[in-house]
Image (cartoon, grey):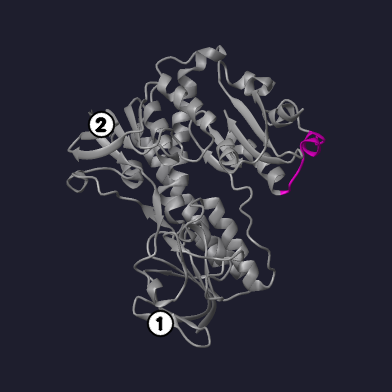
Amino acid sequence: MTYDVAIIGGGPAGYTAAEKAGKGGLSTILFEKNALGGVCLNEGCVPTKTLLYSAKVYDTIKHAPKYAVSAENATFDYAKIIARKNKVVKKLTAGIRLKMKENGVEVISGEAFIQGRAEDGTLTITSGGQTYEAKHLLICTGSETVIPPIPGLAETEYWTSREALQCKELPKSLVIIGGGVIGMEFASFFNSMGTEVIVVEMLDKILGAMDKELSDLLQAEYAKRGVKFYLGHKVTAIHGTEVSVEKEGETLTLEGEKILLSVGRRPVTKGFGLENLPVEPFRNGVKVNEYMQTSLPNVYACGDITAFSLLAHTAVSEAEVAIDHILGHAHPMSYRAIPGVVYTNPEIAGVGKTEEELQASGTPYTVKKIPMAFSGRFVAENEMGNGVCKLILAEDGTLIGAHLFGNPASELIVIAGIAIEKGLKAEEITSFVFPHPTVGEIIKEALG
C-alpha cells in the first residue's frame, strides 16, 4: 500500500503531524523506534516539569510560615516523586497512542530507513523487513545530547538528562556542565531537593541567548540558595568525580558525587537513510522553506532536524504548517514570536527580540520595565518574591520583545507572544480589559 504521508519520528512534530494528517483524511503511517512522545515527553519537557513541580510544592511548604501557615518538618519521598513522574509520562504516552488510533494512523514500532525516491516522487521506506511507500515524507527525527570531546569523559559514569531523570537516589553533590535551560532546570530541582549544586558555563552568562538582565537576576537568586556558578570557565578534563576547569589561564578542580552533562543538543541526521535523499543541508540539520519543504518538494522536515529552534512548541507549529500545505491550506511558518521558558522557581520567560539582539543590529528601541510587585496578585502570592516585567517597543510603539522574571512567567508570556505575532502597538494592548487581580495585569501596567 502507498500512504499519502509517512512520518519518521513520533515526537511532538511527528505525532502532531500524524494526528492532523489522519483528521484531514490522509492515509498516514508513523515510524517510531523508541516511545511515542519522543524526547520531550519521555526524557525531556514533561518529566522534568513533573519533578520541578514536586520541588516547587516542597519549597512552598518549607516557606509556609511566610504566609502565616504552620508546616513543620517538611519531608519528601524521592522514590515516590520519581514514580509520579513515570505515571505522568505513561498517562500522556497512552493518550498519544489513543489519538493515533482514533485518527487511523498506522504506528510502526521500529527503526525506519529511507531507501530512496523514485522519479515520480514516490518514497520507499523499510522497517522490520517490510517495505512501505509514500507520496509525502515528513522527517521528524528530533535531536540528541551533544557529547563534547572532554578528556576523561568517556571513562566517566556521567549523567545526561536521561540518566538524571532515572536516578533512584539523590546525589549529595552535583556538577552540572552547561548553564543553559536544561542545566538550570536541573540545578533548580536538585538544589530544592538539598543537593549541593555547581554550575559550570563556558559563556559569561547563564541561559544562552535569553535576556541578560533577567538571566543575571535568576543566577543571583540561585546563588543566594547555595548554587555555585563558574561562568566563563572551560572544562578541560574529567577524572572520576573531579572536573578540571580553566579561566584566563587559571585552573580549578571541582568535585561532585555526580556529573551532569548539559551542553546542548543537535539534530539527529544519521541512521535512517537521509543520505539517500539529495536534500540541502542547513547548519547541522536540513534546510526548509516557509512551508517546511526541503529541497525535494514532497519531503518535509519539522522540529529539531531543521536546526533552527530546538523547542517542542516550535516543532508542533512546524508540523501543522507542513500538513496544512499537503492538504492545500497553505500558510507560512512564522518564527516572529517563539517563546522560550525556563521552569525554575521563579520562572523566567522571553519572546521576540532581546536588548542584546537589537543593540547588535543597531536597531532603535524603547524599554518599559517595572517590578512584578506592581501586581497585587503577585505580592499576595510571592511573599518577599522578586520579579521583573520588561517589554521592548519599536520606534512606532509596536511590541517586539517581552521578558518576564517571576511566577507564572510561563503562562504570561503567551499574552506578549500573541501581541508580537499580531504586530500590536502599546496602545492597542492597553485597550484590552485584563482581569483584576491577576499577575497578567503587569503587562498592561508596564505599558501604561
Tell me the kind of residue under disc 1. Answer: Thr
| Residue 131 circle label | 1
| Horizontal and vertical percent position of residue 239 | 17, 38
Going 67% across and 36% down the picture, which residue do you hit?
A: 365
Residue 168 can be seen, yes or no: no
**Local secondary structure at mark 2:** loop
**Local secondary structure at mark 1:** strand
Residue 409 as seen in the image, left or right of residue 432: left
Question: Is residue 54 positioned above or below 120 on the image?
Answer: above
**Label 1: how many Cα within 10 Å (few below 14, some 14–19, many 20+):** some
| Horizontal and vertical percent position of residue 227 | 37, 25
| Horizontal and vertical percent position of residue 435 | 76, 31
Q: Which residues are magenta?
A: 422-433
Residue 305 can be seen, yes or no: yes
- Magenta stretch: includes residue 400: no
Tell me the kind of residue under disc 2. Answer: Gly
Going 60% across and 21% down the picture, which residue do you hit?
A: 381
Quadrant (top left, top right, bottom left, bottom right) of the C terminus: top right
Residue 414 as seen in the image, left or right of residue 278: right
**Label 2: how many Cα within 10 Å (few below 14, some 14–19, many 20+):** few
Q: To which residue does mark 2 refer? A: 249
Question: Is residue 247 positioned above or below 226 on the image?
Answer: below
Going 47% across and 86% down the picture, which residue do you hit?
A: 118
| Residue 243 circle label | none
Residue 131 as seen in the image, left or right of residue 217: left
Front of the two marks 2 and 1: 2
Q: Earlier in the sequence, mark 2 or mark 1?
A: 1
